[in-house]
Amino acid sequence: MAYLVSFLAIGGAWIAHAALTDRLARTNPVFLRLKRFVLLAVLMLPFPTRLLAEWFGEREAERVAVALFGVTLLVTRLAGVALDGYARSSGRSRSGRAPSEHGWSGSPTLSGGLASRLDAVVPPGLSHGGVRSPHSR
């Protein structure tokens, strides 16, 4: 299950990145450096995923793994929002194009739309700790 969640998180980052790059008119070295930081954050996801898989069922260790996984998702999201914000504020986005609903900043959830993607595979009422998101399908 941990690898499925990690796959969905990486897939969400990929979709958001594709939406962002579709809007770009041009780039510069600052944008590319920020983009590298997003890649670094996404590449860190396999480490807490492995810990989740190894420590599943060990109460205290599992809490650490879940916290580390959450922090990694948060860093990934913040890096993506920073990249998206830079693209918007620096005039790198094509004019006249509306932000994508799947972009880093266009998602209604903190994890870049991961929660809504989980709703597609998790039975109703079980996602989000038993609380349905108002953005769920």
Image: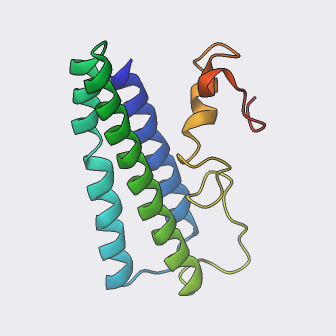
Residue 93 in which image quadrant: bottom right
Residue 75: where, in percent of width, then height? 39, 56
Specify whether 73 is left or right of 91.
left
Colour scheme of this structure image? rainbow
Q: Nearer the viewer, residue 112 or 18?
A: 112
> Which is nearer the eye, 22 or 37?
37
Residue pictured at 29% horizontal, 24% vertical:
60
Taking the image as shown, residue 75 lies to the left or right of residue 54, namely right
Where in the figure is residue 128, as x and y percent of width and height? 61, 28
**For residue 23, which quarter of the picture?**
bottom right
User: With respect to residue 55, does 85 lie above or below?
Assistant: below
Residue drawn where x is 25% and y is 47% of the image: 44
* Residue positioned most to the front: 60
In screen coordinates, is 38 left or right of 92? Answer: left
Residue located at (68% from left, 81% from top): 95
Q: Name which residue lies at 36% across and 32% down.
A: 66
In the displayed structure, 131 sits above or below 93; it is above
Q: Is residue 116 above or below residue 41?
A: above
Q: Position of residue 131 (x, y in %)?
A: 70, 26
Instruction: Decide: is 113 above or below 84.
Output: above
Instruction: Please state, as top left, top right, bottom left or bottom right, where the C terminus lies in the image.
Output: top right
Quarter of the figure with residue 133: top right
Tally the numbered discs.
0
| Quarter containing the N terminus | top left
129 with respect to 68 (left or right): right
